[in-house]
Amino acid sequence: MAAAIKASACISPAIGIALDNNMAESRHAIKSISIKKQNRFDSKKQEELRANSEKMKKLIIKNDKMSARQNLIKLKDKKQQGTTQYPNALRQGNLKHIPRVTKMDMFQDYSDPTSPPSAFADNYVSRTFSSYNLKQQLTSIAQEIPNANITIEVIGRTLEYQDILMLRISENTGHRYFRADDQKYAEELPEKKIIFIVHGLKVMGMRDIPCLSTTGSFRVLLSYYTSHLDKFNIFLIPMANPDGYTYIRSTYNEELVWLKRGINFIEVPFSEAETRAVRDIFHKYGHKIVAFFNVHAGSYHSSVFRGDAVLYPKGYSDTAIDDDKYIDLKGEIDEVIRNASFQVYSVTVDTLYNWYGLVKGSSVDYASTVYGIPYSMELVMQGYDEEGNYYDEDYSYLALNEVWSKVIDVIMSYIWKSIHGNDSKR
């Protein structure tokens, strides 16, 4: 028994060492297994992350393709609607266009939104020009001009199916009959030259100029034109860009204007119906037109003051031209402004280039260069904000009555004298 115990005592250290080795191997095995599991988990996680990354890339590519496809569809729709900036879409003659739906005001008591709208009178005519009701407004105005024969003519139609109207104005002599005898041609006067006037070819700031956007002030401006019917016949387009005018009346956008593009210097000239209508008048009556006036506002908003101006060619070049006639006209305008009732005021008479900088596609340059119109000018009117006016004076009316009445009279008289010289008889 004692020998057995002694033998076991001798063996026990070896067994302890073996057990320690086994424990160490077990711990190492367990550690290696955990490391393998961790590596397997990490690799699996990396694969999942890689798969998710691939999915995200595919989704991004898909979204990009969808957005690109949507952009192409939008561009195609714009081309079909004729609103794209690329003229090639305008060459397609079989496109169908939908008119813009404009905002309409309800004539009702605003303090009570539930009140029914009030009915219009049978002879009601809006005081503000409306592109959709312009013919009725012009007809009403024409009846109030006693010394003129006024004919309203449709010379074109816009992309949104609005008529471009022109007033043919001639003197009303009151002679309804003539005597047919051998001497009927003996004292026949030569045919009058034409003054071609266009309002609203450029719609920026147009609603800040009452004589371009309201019936009452327009009637006053028209009377300044018709006071020279003994010298000239007048062709007047009161609203050359009805679509642009409709837009600025419904939603004001400082940059959405028709800056006379499409006249002469772009890739496809006369891509717009409005410019084609003006061009056709030049083409048909260019040999009779002695002067062309493009009348518009001078800035986008009345808060920008640049003053009134009479501008003449050129706008596309700073090279000097034979502008002696315009320099003489400047002298006469300066003189009449100095002799006016107000103290300090001036009307700038200068070239398009000096006023705007480099300008391409101007209707004034087109009339002067292509058709050789003797007098081609822009009449730039300064707008005034009557709502923010702290004084009793109506500055828009004063500018029209005191400034432009004199400027228009001087220009018309100067053109007449330059054509007929010192001959005061017709």
Image (cartoon, rainbow, N blue to C red):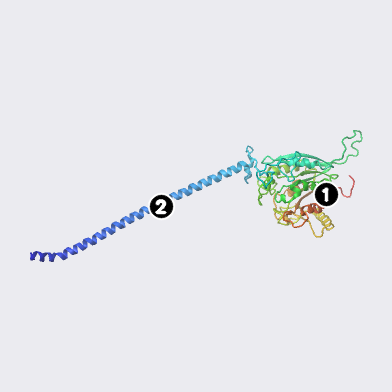
Residue 171: x and y in percent read: 84, 42
The quadrant in which the C terminus is found is top right
Comparing 120 with 178, the one in front is: 120
Spatial CA distance of label 2 from label 1 is: 81 Å
193 relative to 20, above or below: above
Query: As shown in the figure, which amino acid type bears the numbered disc 1?
Result: Met
> Which amino acid, by three-letter code, is at mark 2?
Arg
Residue at the image point whose x is 20% and y is 62% from the top: 19
Confirm whether residue 322 shows in the render.
no
From the image, tell me which residue sits under label 2: 50
Looking at the rendered structure, the secondary structure element under dot 2 is helix
Judge left or right: residue 104 versus residue 349.
left
In x, y percent, where is residue 62?
48, 47
Q: Earlier in the sequence, mark 2 or mark 1?
A: 2
What is the quadrant of the N terminus in the image? bottom left
Instruction: Look at the picture and state if 120 lies above or below 337.
Output: above
- 24 left or right of 129 in image: left
**Residue of label 1:** 412
Please give the name of the residue rendered at 51% of the width and 45% of the height, measured from the top-left corner. Answer: 66
Does residue 39 appear in this view?
Answer: yes
Q: Position of residue 338 (x, y in %)?
A: 83, 58
